[in-house]
Amino acid sequence: MTASTRDVLLTCPLDCPDACRLRVTLGRDEHGREVAVRLTGDADHPVTRGFACAKTVHYPERQNHPERPLYPMKRMDGQLVRISWEQALDEIAARLQDILTRRGADAILRYNYAGTMGLREGTHVHSFFRALGAPELDETICATAGTEAWAMGYGPRYGIDLADVPHARTIVLWGINSLSTNSHLTPAMTEARRNGARIICVDPYRTRTARYADTHLRLRPGSDAALALGVARELIHQGWTDEAYIREATVGFETFRAEAEAYTPERTAELTGLSVEQIRDLARQIGTASPTFIRVGYGMTRHEFGGAGLRAVTLLPALTGDWRRRGGGCMLSSSGAFALNRSRLGAAHLIRPDVRHVNMNELASALEPDAGLEALFVYNTNPAVVAPDSGRVRRGLARPDLMVVVLEQAMTETARLADYLLPATTFMEHADVYTSYGHHYLGFNPATLQAPGEARPNSWVFAELGRRLGLQEPSLYWSMDELLAALLDTDHPHLAGITPERVRTEGSVRLNLPEEFLPYAHGAGTPSGRVQFTPVPLHQEAEARLTAEYPLRLLTPPAHHFLNSTYGNLERLNRAEGGEPQAMVHPQDAAAAGVQHGQRAQLISEQGQVVRQVRVTEDVQPGVVVVEGTWWGLSAPDGKSINELTAQTLTDLGGGSTFHNTRVRLYPQVVG
């Protein structure tokens, strides 16, 4: 590596609310090629504040990984063999043309998610499939339950400005391990704490965030609605509500109050596992130490009735009127503020009302032979590891009659099952534009590095296939300039003064929001124009109740050093997470199962079984097993993803995933 270096500023593309502005140091390798050698945060960016998270600081190691796919490959005699781009594209196009002639586009499916949050390489590339008339993939694995829950109460998802958090006097982190998944919120919370704020973490187990908080409320998994309704009842009974706000900006309060009346402190304690005093203390803090900022995460929605849970929590600021106070309110996502013109993004205008939809949580079923698929394109995701019922997913991907095309930057387990593996560029190697769901800055990256080997952007691959198939949709072939111009072709006030030239020049541009942004101070974006308390989100017990056969609830929250399955191939980060995936078990449950700390044990669900090392700890509560992180199966002792255990069950709202709904039993590992 030569001593000559230069720094560039780029936006992180990964699925995280922070959407950091990164300072990447570039040097040259032994061949004279410019490569990334170091990465940190942009010290001048008001959100990033000069530091990158414990994951992304290691991105150069991922970018330059020796096993990174660099050339097109085809499966021949069970092995992936290098071929040319021309051969790969010609053969894939010919196979697609045959399928289209015999079966139609209904036999072709895309499977993608948020491996990049770039609007070009992550979303606009759907244009190819919509031009074909292929089925729509409902991208439901993460956010849809929360999105629909929020929309029922408030309409578009707005959040308070991060710069206003220090004005809060109460901060409630509900169902989010923010120190690991929204780390740039931490400096703002620390500043609020110096100003006198109290920080409360509501989470079923003791996370990094729970340790950071002043108070940790370890509620029973899936009981969020009960706790929120119990707090609401106490706020109402104690006179800690804002009657003017309720009268002027909401609808349905009387019905909500009548339903909440049943959630006495005693009943709420029984449902949540908390004490009566803990419940009253939370209500007292929210009701008397204003403004209150509640940061909710999507984790609480990963249950059968997770949509109702999130709805109930997010309605609390409507009771107290904290939406009218700087630093007060609630936040799930800030994405609603990015009022871009998306009418042709991903050729959205081509979506037919009669097109078939496939819920991405039900990929295992979609891959069954009788479901009719003959071609699957996978990009920006790793379904062999992250999809529910992953054992059945892997069997489906291995079907000899299914053409599996994978566009990838890493040799994932999904890539290893591909019939055609096409090497993809990273965010340093292609141009793209980025929104955020944690702040209000629009980001842009130019193509900064020359792609190694023969790696190509997703957009290039699908445009080349489109040309071979004779697709005429113009947006499929848009340049970055054309896409950026289309996105900014709007007169929405949030984008006033933001031009393509300015975005390209500045790289990170704040939306045109008022200095004091109070999005729901006078109502909401619902059909009524008001915050809607009805239909009232009530607590419901999961149908998959714990039994003598399956006495434990499995939670699979994010790990500190992984982002979904991204970074799972970095040995340094595997070691930082303990070297292999571990099952955190309460001493009481470990004793009942006859397993000891450090031993490997079997976790068995109705879907399958895995082997995991046991970590006995009181950080989890009795009746709960926690396995942090979506580890690659390659790093597990049995070669299996934790999603071998999870089911395709869907949430009450939005058709979302229910990863935290899994019930399991624990056995000592059977050897031999």
Image (tube, rainbow, N blue to C red):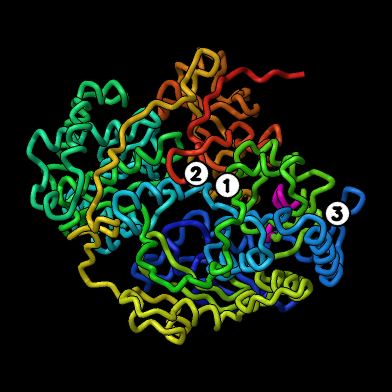
Residue at coordinates 32% horizontally, 56% vertically from top-left?
A: 155
Look at the image and tell me in which quarter the N terminus lies: bottom right
Report, in whole angstroms, how far the alpha carbon at label 1 lies from the one at label 3: 28 Å
Q: Amino acid at mark 3?
A: Arg
Contact between labelled residues 1 and 2, with CB atoms less than 8 Å apart:
yes
Q: Quadrant of residue 495?
A: bottom left
Image location of residue 124, percent across then percent down: 58, 69
Q: Pointer 2: residues within 10 angstroms few (<14), some, or many (20+)? A: many
Does the image show residue 370?
A: yes
Q: Amino acid at mark 2?
A: Gly
Look at the image and tell me in which quarter the C terminus lies: top right
- Residue 75's tag is 3
Report, in whole angstroms, how far the alpha carbon at label 2 lies from the one at label 1: 7 Å
Image location of residue 323, percent across then percent down: 19, 55
Secondary structure state at the residue bearing disc 2: loop
Q: Nearer the viewer, residue 133 or 229?
A: 133
Q: In this picture, which residue range is highlighted in magenta?
A: 408-416
> Can you identify the residue that label 1 sits on?
359
